[in-house]
Amino acid sequence: MEDAYLFRLSQMSKLDWFKNIALVSSAQDSYVGFESARIQFRKEASTKPSSAKNELYEKMAKNILGNVPLNQIYRLDVNFKIQEKNLDSFIGRSAHIRFLENQPLMRMFVSRYAEFF
């Protein structure tokens, strides 16, 4: 698995070139795993016996964030008020798409975290 493209890409991480890194996630988004979007270790990984998949994930996370000082990483959680009950909300697509289409969220993010830009 370490010869997979995504793993090799994690080894080329250049996030330390950035002054601030904002990782925005939503537990409502089922398209991108919550811990994956945050580049964060999964809680169950520390309590369950280690598997090859968990070890690979941990290596990738360490590769990506290994040289980045903790005070440069901001993990932001978004909770969308999704009231409609449809297929998109059931499979977690609604939250995923709202990150891309929600202009008020983008404006709030840019104004609240202006120091990132």
Image (cartoon, rainbow, N blue to C red):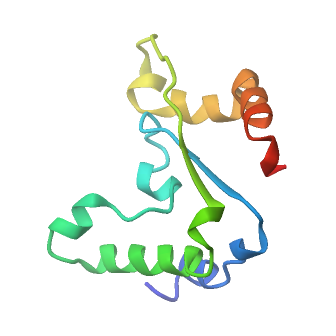
Point out residue 78 in the picture as x, y percentages from the top left corner: 53, 33
Looking at the image, which residue is at 61% across and 73% down?
69
23 up-or-down from 99: above or below: below
Name the outermost residue toward the front: 71
Which image quarter: residue 18?
bottom right
In the image, residue 19 lies at what x, y percent?
77, 64
Name of the residue lying farthest toward the bottom: 3
Instruction: Give the residue displayed 66% in from the left and 78% down from the top.
Output: 13
Relative horizontal placement of residue 108, taking residue 7 as reference (left or right): right
**104 to 21, vertically: above or below:** above
Residue extending furthest toward the right: 117
Quadrant (top left/top right/bottom left/bottom right) for the N terminus: bottom left
**Residue in front for this viewpoint, 105 or 82:** 105
| x then y, percent, for residue 70 | 56, 67
Residue drawn at point x = 32 percent, y = 74 percent: 53
Image coordinates of residue 9 in percent, x first then y, are: 63, 79
